[in-house]
Image (cartoon, rainbow, N blue to C red):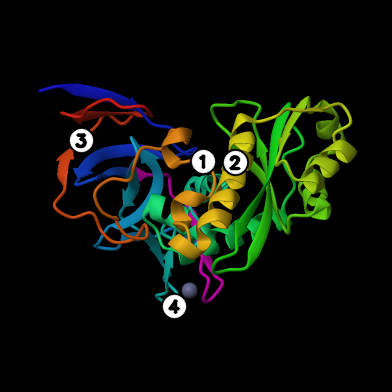
Amino acid sequence: MATVTIDIDLPPDVTLTAYHRHGDGHGFEVSWPLPGRCRCDRCGREEDSRVEYRDHAQVVRDLDLWGQPSFFVYQPAFHRCPWCNHRQFFLPPFKRKDTSYTFRFEQHVLRALIGSNEEEVARRLAISAETVGLIVNNQLADSQAKQVDPARVITDVGIDELSLKKRHKLYVTILTDLTNPDRPEVLAVAKGKDEAAGRQCLEKLSPKQREAVRTYRADMGAPLNAACRGLLKNARPVIDRFHVAKKFNEAIDAQRKKNHEEVQGEADEGAAEGVPVVDVGVPPPPGGPVGAGGGEIRGLVCEVAPAADAVRVPGAVPGDL
Ligand SMILES: [Zn+2]
């Protein structure tokens, strides 16, 4: 038997307790410390936590592993209020209420939308286009409510427009921290794709942070570039291979449509926009869709892993993470 060790990044305070392989997916059993006190949502009384567990597991979509969907699996815990008997569930630190995907999966969806569209991203991640729209709206609401941590050191950023034009008629500008190019992180999102939207994103950074930015990669359209020129005084634009490729593809595509519209009808919408999926390092999607991040992983083959950030996968074949 071959053994492969994978390093997994976990959100703060989250511990890995087991690994399950199921079909084309990966299940990671996780736990996190529960608070000692709990205030009841129904009657408002605070008490020492009286913890009980629901009998079936909750499955939450997380980032892909080796191009295959991975999931956090846990037994939902709740506080049973001694006053009114209300079941008050503890919210995991890695997701928001009433969703079945992690915060970092939401950010991944936003990043995947750059140079793509909701239908293509939905297909690639095996989630519904509705879920993609919901995630973008959640992220928009979050971003409106908060500033970027002023202590964060940001030297390189990317700013792009996302379009969810097919179903949601929604244009969004996204600001990404590219200081560590291997780990791009979403800093802010704003509605719209004009200069004002670009400024709104950049103003989530403190004036000091904006001064410290050295480079920006902007969508090639004029408005976002203008926002960067205005607010990032010490930064220079970097032409991004990805953005150039996108522009190039659009030009070719426009040409193709012009020439063949009458003959061939509409071009294939999935493949036509942006860079082909394989060119940006995303492996082709596995066998079939695994559902919208919900559902349960059944028939689990379980191997208990050490309670560390490493998991051993028996018989797995290494790939590019
Ligand atoms: Zn109560």
Disc 4 is placed on an element classified as loop
Disc 4 crowd rating (10 Å Cα; few below 14, some 14-19, many 20+) is: few
Earlier sequence position, callout 2 versus callout 4: 4
Disc 3 is placed on an element classified as loop
Q: How far separated are the C-alphas under marks 3 and 2?
A: 44 Å
Circles 1, 2 touching at the beta carbon (< 8 Å): yes
Residue at 29 percent of width and 55 percent of height? 290
Disc 1 crowd rating (10 Å Cα; few below 14, some 14-19, many 20+) is: many
Residue 63 placement, left or right of 149: left
Image location (x, y in percent) of residue 274: 54, 45
- Residue 232's quadrant in the figure? top right
Disc 1 is placed on an element classified as loop
Earlier sequence position, callout 4 versus callout 3: 4
Residue type at mark 3 is Val
Residue type at mark 4 is Cys
Residue type at mark 1 is Val
Image location (x, y in percent) of residue 111: 56, 44
Compare residues 136 and 119 and report the one nearer the observer.
Answer: 119
Residue at 68 percent of width and 37 percent of height? 158
Compared with 131, 259 (above or below) is: above
Earlier sequence position, callout 1 versus callout 4: 4
- Residue 288 in view of the camera: yes
> From the Cβ of disc 4, is ligand 1 less than 8 Å away?
yes
- Residue 17's quadrant in the figure? top left
**Residue 304 badge:** 3
Residue type at mark 2 is Lys
Disc 2 is placed on an element classified as helix
Q: How far separated are the C-alphas under marks 1 and 4?
A: 56 Å
